Image (spheres, rainbow, N blue to C red):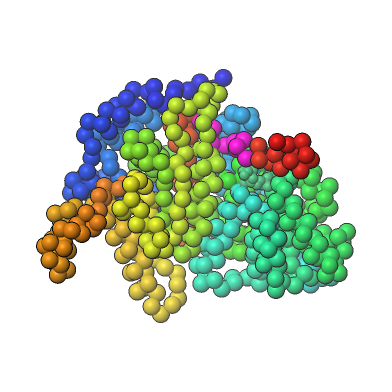
Amino acid sequence: MTTFTRPELTPAWQTLGRLASQHPLSLSHLLADSARTQSLNLQAAGLQLDASRQRVDQSVLHALHQWAEQMQVMTRARDLFAGELVNVTEGRAALHVALRGSFVKNPPWGDKVSGLVELELDRFLSFAERARNGHWRGLDGQIITDVVNIGIGGSDLGPRMACQALAVRDGGAASSSLRVHFVSNPDPLALQSVLAGLQPARTGFIVQSKTFTTQETLTLAASARRWLQDAGCPVERQAPHWVAVTAKTDLARQQGFMPEQTFSFWDWVGGRYSVWSAIGLPLAMAIGSSAFKAFLQGARAMDEHFLSADAQHNLPLTMALLGAWNQHFLQAHTLNLAPYAYGLSLFPAFIQQLEMESNGKRTHIDGSPVAVSTAPVVWGGLGSDGQHAYFQLLHQGTHTVPVDFIGVLQTDSSLPLAQSHQEVVLGNLLAQAQALALGRDAERTLVALQAEGMSEEEARRLCPHRTYVGNSPNSIVWMDRLSPQSLGTLIALYEHKVFCQAALWGINPYDQWGVELGKTMVRDMASGSGA
Ligand code: F6P
C-alpha cells in the first residue's frame, strides 16, 4: 500500500485556505513592489520564469512550499529518478529521464538502464543519419526522400511538435534530403492528403506504437501498405520501406518488419514522455543526430536543475505550486497556454496530453477517491492569434483563466523585416500579460474614454462595458531562442511540473486507464456484444 497524506488534510492546506479567504491579493498592489517582482523572476537551464504576475505574496509562497514538503514532493522526485515503481497501478518505473542521459557520473537509475538507452540511441540515430544521407533505399533501390510517421498520441504529438518547432528554425528549408510527414488521424482523408504528391518508390513509413495494437495506427499502416501495393510494390516485398518503433518488438517481427529497421523502447517509458526515445526518430531524421543530442542535453539540464535547486528557485516546483494555488484557492479550473512563437504552434496540443493524460485522475495512489480537483483543463494556441479570437473572455469574461505565456526573444527568421515582426510579437505578449494582471478600473476608464474625445455622459454610459477587472494570474516563460536545446529544456520543465502536481495531489501521473474503456467498447460494439 502506497502511503501518502491526503492534500486537504495537510496543515499547509488549512493555512492556504485561510490566506485565500482572509486577504485577497491585488496584482496592481503586488506589482508595485520591485523587490517582490525581482524575487519572482527565476532563471534555470537557459530559461527564465517571470512569475511576478501571479497572485501570491511571501506568506502564500511560504505556505505553498510547506505544502510541497508535507506531500514529500522532492522525496518522490528522487524516487522517480531512482527508478522506483512510481507507476503504482502498472507496477512500473517511469524512467523517461534516463532517456536523455545522466548529469551525474553514477546515474540513480543504474548502469543497466543507461546501457540499454545508449545502445538504442546509437541505433536509431545511426539510422536517422543513413536516411538523411540518402542511404535508406526502397524496394527497387531508389533513395527514400519522404518518410511518413504513422502514430497517435505520444507516438505523434512529441515528434510532430518538435519537428514543427525546429524545422521552422531553418526557415522551413529542408536541412537534409529527407522530408518528414506525420499522420495520426484514421479519417482516410488524413492519409490521402499526406500521400498526395508522394512517390511510392521513394516513400518510407515509420509505424510508431508502444503497444503495436492501437487501432488507428494499424488502420493507417494497412492503408499505406495498400498504397505501396497498388503502385506495384507487393506487400511481401515492402519491408525495406518500413520502420517500426515499439515496446513490442515481437509483434513488429511477426508483422514482417526488418529487425535492423525495428527500434525499441521500454514499458517504463510512458507514451507522452517518449519523445526522447526512438519515438524521436522522425525528429532525428528532420534535424540530425547532433541536434537531437542537443535536444536531450537541454532536457538533462532541466533534470539537473529540478533535483539540485532549492525549493524557492526550483522552476518546475514553482510552476506546480502556483498552478495548484490558482486552481484550489483562486477557483481557476483551466490553464491557457499562449506561446508567442510560430514554431510552438503545436506546443499547447502536446502539453494537453502531457498534463491531462497524466493528471486527469480522480483516484489517489492508495485507491481512495480524491476530495480535491486534479489536472486543470489545458487549452490554448498561438498567443497573437488568440488575442483576436478568445482573449476577450480572458479580459472581460466571468472565468479566472491563468495563462502561461511563452516568449522567444530572438527569431531565427531571415526576413529583412524580421525584427519589426519580433517587436509586434513580443510587444503584444508583454502588453497582454500586463493588461490581464492590472486591468483598468472605472475611474481610469472614464479618463481614458474622455481622452479619446468622448463626452462625460457617453463615457459614463460605456464605462461598465469598457472596464477590465484584471487581477488575472499569469506567468511568462522566456527562451533566448527556439533551439533543440531550449525546446528540450522547455518540455522537461513541464514534465517535472506535471510530476510535482501529481505528488501534491497524491495521484499516479503515469497510467491512463481512462482511455482503455473506449478501446474495449469499440471492440465490443463491433462484435455486437457491447451496449
Ligand atoms: O491515449 C492512450 C495512449 O496509450 C497514449 O498514452 C499513447 O501515447 C497513445 O495512446 C498511443 O499508444 P501507442 O503508442 O501504444 O500506439
Residue drawn at (37%, 50%) of the image: 403
State left or right for residue 74 relative to residue 216. Answer: left
Residue 420 shows in this picture: yes
Image quarter for residue 130? bottom right
Q: Position of residue 234 (x, y in %)?
A: 87, 63
- Magenta residues span 507-516
Q: Is residue 335 magenta?
A: no
Q: Quadrant of the N terminus?
A: top right
Residue at image coords 46%, 47% = 378
Q: Residue at 30% x, 48% y: name it.
A: 472
Q: Is residue 289 above or below residue 4?
A: below
Q: In the shown orientation, is residue 270 left or right of residue 377?
A: right
For the residue pair 471 and 526, the one nearer the viewer reads as 526
Image mark count: 0
Q: Quadrant of residue 384?
A: bottom left
Between 41 and 193, the one lying in front of the other is 193
